Amino acid sequence: MKLVAISGSLRQASFNTRLGRLMADLSPAGCEVVLKGLHGIPLYNADDEEARGIPEAVEALRGEIKAADGLILITPEYNGAMPGVLKNALDWLTRPGEEMKPTFGHRPTALAGATPGAWGTAMAQSGALINLRQLGVNLFPDFLRVSRAGTVLGDGEVDAKLRDQVGAWLERFVEFARG
Ligand code: FNR
């Protein structure tokens, strides 16, 4: 089984990307977690879509999602919401309209997020529910929220408790995705 995890941060030292790497490291037995980023995805513009179609970077990511048994969206929180970079990618991935269902419909999908703050991206995740309902995913109701990311996912070793938490969460998501 394959899970695709997408980090919603472009930042090189991103805590959310680090969380994605940790997930890849902790891939449960019989399961591979592949981490993908959003570099190279332009801002959505319907004129560009009409003139040039869907960008290669979007089609490549779509291919990864379609080939996966589950999707993990790892979202930072910006002003209480998912960053524009991630929302923009989701918007592209629903274009053209007939691609929305095969890309997202009923796909087992989990939300995760990391922040240096105290609330583990809870607001961004709650807001994302509106988008994910629109996309028609099969939402894993157990959200992974990582607070105090500077301490637990900082430059030093990953916090041991966090490793256990992420490993156990992945096992639960794999079970959910297997149906
Ligand atoms: C933030 N940050 C932030 N954190 C949070 O917990 N709640 C929030 O509402 C916000 N708002 C916010 C807005 C903007 C514009 C920025 C740039 C940052 C802090 C944010 O969690 C922090 O920068 C993380 O490090 C971003 O994630 P990555 O890039 O480390 O993955």
Image (cartoon, rainbow, N blue to C red):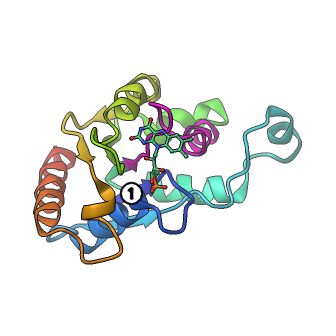
Q: Per the image, is 100 magenta?
A: no
Q: Quadrant of residue 11?
A: bottom right
Q: Is residue 86 magenta?
A: yes
For disc 1, the neighbor class at 10 Å (few under 14, some 14 to 19, many from 20) is: many
Quadrant showing the N terminus: bottom left
Residue 110's quadrant in the figure? top left
- Identify the residue shown where x is 29% and y is 77%: 156
Q: Which residue is mark 1?
A: 5
Q: Quadrant of the C terminus?
A: top left
Residue flagged by tag 1: what amino acid is it? Ala
Choose between 20 and 99: the one closer to the eye.
20
Image-based side of 24 in relation to 16, left or right: left
Residue 122 in view of the camera: yes
Identity of the residue drawn at 18% across and 58% down: 166
Looking at the image, is 30 positioned above or below residue 170?
below
Residue at the spot 23% in from the left edge and 38% down from the top edge = 140
Per the rendered image, the range of residues in magenta is 73-93
